[in-house]
Amino acid sequence: MTMFPSFIPPMPQEIVDAALANPEGFAGAMDAGMEAFASAMEGGSDMGAAFEAFGEACGPIMADMGVSPEAFDAAGDMMGAAVGPAMHMAPADAGGADMGAMIQDGVGMMMPEGVDIPAPIMDAMGDLGQGLADAGCGSHEVAAEMMPPPGEPGFPMPVDPSGECIVIAGDPGSCPADACQPPPPDGACAAVGGEMMPPEGGYDHAPMPADCTMPPPMTMEIAMNDPIDSMGDPASPNIDMAPPPGADMAPPPGADMAPPSDGGDDVLGAALGGPMEAGPPEVPGEGVDAAIGAAMDAAMEQGGDPAAQGDQAGGAGDDGAAGGPEEAGSDPAADPAAGMG
């Protein structure tokens, strides 16, 4: 008994193309990965480290087949979002054949409509499930390792306000009906045995609580860890850090871009990922004072009162030359960096 998530992420096209062009090579890469996984588990590694060993063995072979490292990593995350919930809702003691069937059905649902998966690839997916069982991995532990943490973008099941998953492990009926779907009626789970399929008439699904949410579904951007897309998604529970459309991100006229005079951290530089290429003058404020002086001299040559021309001096700040009327009338003896950090 198990269920799959309502949204199944599509398999990255690079993976689809490579698998269909060379099914035997693809299956061989998966086999090499599982050998590395099993060796790591036998050596005492945890499941996370074992999956890393899988990638280190399988990834280069995939690269030779034309699959980029980015697409390979994304495919793993997207496959986890498709198969993880099935593993989570399956019995804790699901055997290798059951886990293999869930992987086969999940991958089949990820493929483009109308594409027949070659037998070597389906066999490799079945072997992957059996290999997980042989390594002592339980279905619920595999599910937790395959999926993002609950509540994060790409997590494929509903969560409560605290961020905890509301679907009880091993209980498909605890998943709200609109958040899940049964295995394909003619798929691998159906072939394994009746107990992997929902009972006749379906489960008596729990309703979706009013205060629960679904994280944004797994996409290529989320799988490739794009923080802008994942945080900017309007469905995301995370705070949207993107500026509103049309927002002016430029500093205000005359704003001092120099580091604080007390030697503190350069907050702007840190926000931009490093120091700016064109730095401020070596003496803080020196360029600004010179511009103010030039503006005041020009006003005097035209016969104007410097005090009356304060607006002109301040207006020069519109192009970054001066900071404003108050600076034009400041005490020349004052520290030129004062108030500019």
Image (cartoon, rainbow, N blue to C red):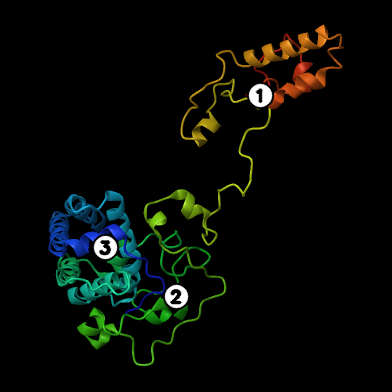
- Amino acid at circle 3: Val
Numbered badge on residue 320 = 1
Separation (CA) of disc 2 from disc 1: 54 Å
Q: Which numbered disc, 1 or 3, marks the residue that appears first in the sequence? A: 3
The one nearer the camera, 129 or 325, is 325
| Residue 335 visible in rendering | no
Task: Count the marks.
Answer: 3
Numbered badge on residue 228 = none
Q: Secondary structure at mark 1?
A: loop
Numbered badge on residue 179 = 2
Q: Quadrant of residue 113?
A: bottom left
Q: Quadrant of residue 127?
A: bottom left
Q: Position of 35 compared to 7: left or right?
A: left
Neighbourhood count class around disc 2 (C-alpha, 10 Å): few under 14, some 14–19, many 20 upward: some
Check the image and name the residue furthest to the top. 301
Neighbourhood count class around disc 1 (C-alpha, 10 Å): few under 14, some 14–19, many 20 upward: some
| Residue 310 visible in rendering | yes
Q: Secondary structure at mark 2?
A: helix
**Which residue is depicted at the point 23% across and 56% down?**
51
- Amino acid at circle 1: Gly
Kindly check if marks 1 and 3 are in contact, taking CB atoms under 8 A apart as contact. no
Q: Position of residue 145 (x, y in %)?
A: 30, 61
Above or below, 43 relative to 94 = above
Above or below, 114 relative to 220 = below
The residue that label 3 is drawn on is 16
